[in-house]
Image: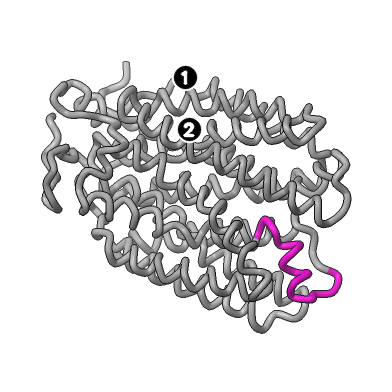
Amino acid sequence: MQSTGTAKKSNVILAIVAASLGYFVDVYDIWLYSVLRVDSLNALGFTDKASNEAMGHLLLNTQMAGFILGAIAFGIISDKKGRLAVLFGSIFLYSLANIANGFVTNIPMYAICRFVAGVGLAGELGAGIALVSELVPKEFRGWATTLVATCGVAGSVAAALFAKVFPWNIGYWIGGGMGIALLIFRIGVFESGMFERLKENDNIRRGDFLGLFKTKERATRYLATILNGAPVWFFAGLFMTFSKELQEALNIANPFPVADIIMISAIGLTVGDVIFGGLSQILKSRRKAFTAALTLMAIAIALILTITKDRTSFYWLMFVAGVGAGYWAVFVTTAGETFGTNLRGTVAVTAPSFVRGLVIPLSIIRGLLIPQFGPIGALTILGVVVLSLAVWAVYRLPETYGRDLEFVESHENVGSDDLAPSAT
């Protein structure tokens, strides 16, 4: 029989692996749609550029709407029922949606599948990060969450590679099959002891989404958490997904296929996750890692929009911008560290999904700006606003490196000192 310490260590390792594979599947699906967008819509009859792009935006926004609604639902479930309830429910819903997606024959069916997949995927990352954050010792927490996020971002590389090999519908079936396999693998994962101890205290309200807005300080903290990650999906949603249209706007001859740009950018994101996740541990500061990443990202995006004239420079600048945008590991780690155990799952699930959901207003605003400023001018304006807000958010959030996570958020109407020790 294993000793208690050995058993705990094996449980932690299993949780990290399960969360890593879950996020891999999550990111695989998100980018699978992006790389298959043109081919799948061509197969459904939308062969001209205007209708293909319009339907592409519609389906992307539908998926992101699913993320938002699913995030709220799964976030509450994560804090009320536990991290594992979300990890099982989310991957099951996603798997069914992706398998069905391979059979679609029209836009309404496609939209329903993307919406349901978005709802399912909304719970994956946050619940996994919350579970890992609560199981791993605080000194190693950043390394563990960096591993989870890096494995996840590698799913975008796999999506781009699979899209080059398989027809679009088989790509979706592969994603659904991976989800079912992961569901079976997760049977041996254990719940967070920190959450189990909290659950024993009936006097602490858990999963109160509206509780995030009951004090000005807490609401600001939550807003800053979301704005902190906004540049990642500004780049991912408007640069990577619509790289074909961006290259055309830059008058680049013989533009790269979307799959190629997504793959090189995704490699950059993966490299960035390792660099900035590790940097946050080495420097013992999440804030310094954020600052370095945002600086690199801003420089690369500025160069893309101002001096890029040929396909080679565009290709490599997208890689560099991807490295800068690869602070997602630090972002999700901070989201899990910033709030108490009774709201940690809610924040860890909703914040990343709301960041992804920002693609909806960003794409709408981009469309409104284009007639007056052109596609490049519109992206420039949005970039300045999004990056400026992210810098504000970084310095508004507390430094969370090495923070003890065994605390809860008070639900009284008080100010910035509304943190109370968790019952043990």
Is label 1 in a helix, a strand or a loop?
A: helix
The quadrant of the image that shows the N terminus is top left
Spatial CA distance of label 1 from label 2 is: 10 Å
Where's the C terminus, which quadrant? top left
Range covered by the magenta-colored residues: 240-254
Picture quadrant of residue 41? top right
**Residue 247 on the magenta segment:** yes
Name the residue: 40% across, 65% down.
390
Residue 366 shows up from this direction: yes
Image: 230 above or below 119:
below
Q: Is residue 419 left or right of residue 104?
A: left
Instruction: Indicate yes or no whether the magenta region holds residue 329.
Output: no
Left or right, 94 with respect to 140, comes to right
Q: Quarter of the image holding residue 190?
A: top left
Image coordinates of residue 141 in percent, x first then y, are 32, 47
Mark 2 surroundings within 10 Å by alpha-carbon count, few (fewer than 14), some (14 through 19), many (20 or more): many
Q: Amino acid at mark 1?
A: Ile
| Residue occupying the point 34% across, 42% down | 347
Front residue of 284/227: it is 227
Q: Which residue is mark 2?
A: 18
The residue indicated by pointer 1 is 187
Which label was assigned to residue 412?
none
Could you say which is closer to the camera, residue 154 or residue 254?
Answer: 254
Q: Residues within 10 Å of mark 1 (few under 14, many from 20)?
A: few
The answer to which quarter of the image holds residue 391 is bottom left
